[in-house]
């Protein structure tokens, strides 16, 4: 079965600094990978997805992620953090033939002014 | 257009009572999913519908949980004889088609508190 690991439940970043959230996946077949963001008392919003077209994926709000098969990773980055980036971020994996998403534990991002 | 909607947004119920949670997917979306989000377990898959059929119910935690979908649209998740461990946020999502590459759009969730 596929799974996702996100380390560091809470991540603090200074406003204007690089945001880096790590995601490693486990899958015996080629995965589809997603990053979602959740603001307080809201549902999940898709930031970006990898579906094998390009290894560097650009998403909304200035975020991007790079798929590295050799490292089984799909880390999320943003060059310059903004106060509005404070939220919880989830990495998720799905594989062909299995429609469910398997989520990581999430990273709560705090932006320090 | 309208997104996925869920009702109620909050539900407080006494242990042992039954509850029904409703999900209205995006119009035209054929696939519908239920997930549960809790502090201890994170985000867990519960059940998936393609049309009115549920090919994958493997995430339902016990036989107290059931779900149905009618008219290829609205879905209801029912929890019978609620227990305190059922307290969580229940999220519904829909996608245009079934298939792992299709984006799932999430509703705002129903926060269930069992007292």
Image (spheres, coloured by chain):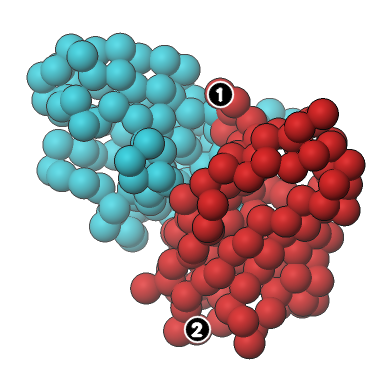
Res. B26 visible in picture: no
Q: CA distance from mark 1 to mark 2?
A: 34 Å
Q: Please state which of residues B39 and A37 is positioned toward the viewer in this rendering.
A: B39
Instruction: Pinpoint residue A2: horizontal percent, then vertical percent.
Output: 43, 71
Instruction: Pinpoint residue B42: horizontal percent, then vertical percent.
Output: 40, 45
Q: Please, what secondary structure does the residue beneath circle 2 have?
A: loop
The answer to whether B37 appears left or right of B68 in the picture is right
Q: Is residue A33 above or below residue A106?
A: below
The residue depicted at 76 percent of the width and 32 percent of the height is A112
The residue carrying pointer 1 sits among few (fewer than 14), some (14 to 19) or many (20 or more) residues within 10 Å by Cα, namely: few
How many numbered marks does the figure carry?
A: 2
* Residue on which disc 2 sits: A29
The answer to whether A34 appears left or right of B36 in the picture is right
Q: Please, what secondary structure does the residue beneath circle 1 have?
A: loop
Which tint is chain A?
A: red
For the residues beneath circles 1 and 2, the answer to whether they share a chain is: yes
Q: Please state which of residues B30 and B91 is positioned toward the viewer in this rendering.
A: B91
* Residue on which disc 1 sits: A41
Q: Please state which of residues B45 and A85 is positioned toward the viewer in this rendering.
A: A85
Res. A22 visible in picture: yes
Q: Please state which of residues A111 and A92 is positioned toward the viewer in this rendering.
A: A111
Q: Quadrant of the C terminus of chain B?
A: top left
- Chain letter, colour cyan: B
């Amino acid at each position: 079965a596929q799974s996702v690991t996100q380390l560091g439940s809470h991540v603090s970043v200074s406003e204007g600094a690089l945001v880096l959230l790590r995601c490693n996946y486990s899958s015996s077949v080629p995965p589809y990978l997603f990053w979602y963001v959740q603001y307080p008392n809201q549902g999940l919003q898709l930031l970006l997805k990898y579906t094998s077209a390009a290894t560097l994926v650009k998403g909304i709000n200035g975020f991007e992620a790079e798929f590295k098969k050799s490292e089984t990773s799909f880390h999320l980055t943003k060059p310059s953090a903004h106060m509005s980036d404070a939220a919880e971020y989830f990495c998720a994996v799905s594989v062909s033939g299995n429609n469910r998403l398997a989520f990581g534990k999430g990273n709560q991002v705090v932006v320090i002014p | 257009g309208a997104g996925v909607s869920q009702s109620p947004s909050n539900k407080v119920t006494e242990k042992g009572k039954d509850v029904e949670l409703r999900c209205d997917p995006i119009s035209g979306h054929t696939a519908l999913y239920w997930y549960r989000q809790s502090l201890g377990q994170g985000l867990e898959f519960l059940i998936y519908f393609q049309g009115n059929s549920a090919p994958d119910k493997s995430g339902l935690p016990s036989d107290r949980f059931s779900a149905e979908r009618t008219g290829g649209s609205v879905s209801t998740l029912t929890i019978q004889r609620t227990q305190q461990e059922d307290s969580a946020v229940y999220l519904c999502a829909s996608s245009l088609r079934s298939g792992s590459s299709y984006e799932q759009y999430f509703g705002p969730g129903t926060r269930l508190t069992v007292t």
